[in-house]
Amino acid sequence: MSDTQYIASVVATYWFVSISMVYLNKVLMSNDGISIDAPLFVTWYQCVITALICWTAGEVAQHMQKRAEILPKTNDDAPSASAAGKKSFFSQFPKAEYNAVTGKKVFPLSVVFVGMITFNNLCLKWVEVSFYNVARSLTIVFNVVFSSVMLGSSTSSRTMLCLGVVILGFFMGSKGEVNFSFRGTVAGICSSLFVSLNSIFTKKILPAVDNDHWRLTFYNNVNACILFIPLILYYEVPTIIAAMNAQLVSTTFWTAMTVAGFFGFSIGIVTVLQIKATSPLSHNISGTAKAAVQSMMAFYIWGNQATFMGVLGIFTVLGGSLMYTLVKMKENSSKSMSGKSAPPK
């Protein structure tokens, strides 16, 4: 396979997994014939699947490592060249062991994580799929606000202009949305807030898990499984009991739930693959294009009614987000170059 074919296949896989995850979660959140009206339970199950996949991948990695250690050695007691040259996909996953002390350190991030995925799914439940990206478009605004308030970072006029474009697109999209949901939009704003907090807390907590992304994913999802239980018991037990002889014994329901959980885990892998195969900038451009296609497809697949103002709001939000990415990358590059050119003290 040529480099071009490989890049195309990675980008296509990223688009497929990302769009499929959104559409499938929409079904699970709003289709009473297939799913149940228990978004916390659905989200909890997806965390269980992710934690189990992390544990399984870690066990496979340990097994393959032990197997490699008993492979035939060369004369210099090093592993054979063929074995050394092959790096297993599972080698990136650490052994998934839950340590209570580490789990306690990760706990603040897990609280934010629960808020993020809960409001994200509630937003998807209450708004049209075509409006989903607009409802959750204020993440970069919160990023700049929190960076300024918590980290004391300065904000350039170009960045402020980009934020203005995104906010304008948000209000245009809201104005043009035919089936506007106030609670869904509020959930989208809350989701954006928690996404921003999640990125800040992740940077702070990563050293507690040896800067290992998959180890953090395991701890985060195990903690989330625990945190969701009292919420489910308080809000959703009657709904779950009512579905005991219906959806909860349906193969279709559990298959959709499990596939959605798998997609939730897979999006982390395909995102890393796309960044490695292209670049951070190309990844953001791909993500912006994917969001546009996802929204446009939703008008057809879900029968969402399109308006000129609504469509213009979608592309204004996406355009402002792309402008923000370009501006931040240029500013970071300039800072890096100025740092290198600075004379030693």
Image: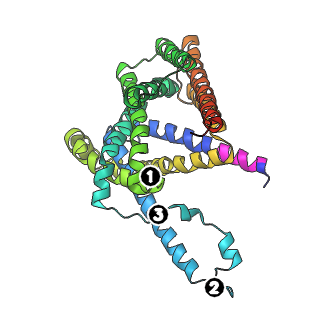
| Depicted 249 relative to depicted 151: above or below | below
Which SS class for mark 1? helix
Q: Secondary structure at mark 3?
A: loop
Q: Quadrant of the C terminus?
A: top right
Q: Residue 157's spot in the image, x, y percent?
A: 55, 16
Q: Residue at x 47, y 55 (%)?
A: 212
Res. 287 image quadrant: top right
Specify whether 185 is left or right of 314.
left
Mark 2, residues whose alpha carbon is within 10 Å: few (<14), some, or many (≥20)?
few
Q: Earlier in the sequence, mark 3 or mark 1?
A: 3
Q: Secondary structure at mark 2?
A: loop
- The dot on residue 77 is 2
The residue to which callout 1 is attached is: 258
For badge 3, the amino acid type reads Pro
Q: Please say whether residue 186 is visible from this viewpoint.
A: yes
Pointer 3: what residue?
94
Q: Amino acid at mark 2?
A: Asp
| Residue 218 appears in view | no
Q: CA distance from mark 3 to mark 1?
A: 23 Å
**Camera-side residue of 155 and 59:** 155
Rounded to the nearest angstrom, the CA distance separating label 2 from label 1 is: 44 Å
Task: Tell me if residue 8 is in the magenta stretch.
Answer: yes
